Image: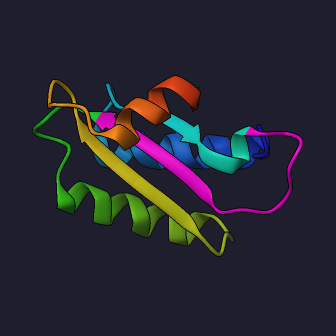
Amino acid sequence: MRLTGEQAKVIKSAALEAFGADAVVRLFGSRVDDGTSGGDIDVHIEAAPEHATVDAEVTFRALIWKRLDEPQIDVVVAARGAEKRWIDRAAEREGIAL
């Protein structure tokens, strides 16, 4: 996993703050592969339906923007229990829980 311990801690903390204590946060995409370099940070967040809102995503992005010096972070939010999209299945299959 190509995140520092501090980056992982900040992402997890911001997700819990924005989406609630039961949010599941996964890193997926190119940063999962230690054999590559570069790439944006892809984060998948699964939260309770009442917390998987646009407002919560905006809060999360604002917290990340304030706390991390990263040029690009892509965020995918999924409501727990909703029908899974291809990106949700990929993140669950290939991602690393933070």
State left or right for residue 49 relative to residue 42: left
State left or right for residue 42 relative to residue 81: right
**Relative height, residue 79 to residue 3 (above, below):** above
Q: Residue at x 71, y 47 (%)?
A: 31
Q: Residue at x 79, y 45 (%)?
A: 2
Q: Residue at x 60, y 70 (%)?
A: 72
Give the residue furthest to the front: 86
Q: Which residues are magenta?
A: 33-46
**Relative height, residue 71 to residue 82 (above, below):** below
7 vs 82, nearest the viewer = 82
Q: Residue at x 42, y 44 (%)?
A: 15
Residue 35 magenta-highlighted: yes
Examine the rendering and report whether any part of residue 71 can be seen.
Answer: yes
Give the residue furthest to the right: 35
Give the residue furthest to the bottom: 71
Q: In the rendered image, which quarter is residue 27 located in? A: top right
x, y (%) of residue 92? 46, 27
Q: Which quadrant of the rendered structure holds the C terminus? A: top right
x, y (%) of residue 36? 86, 50
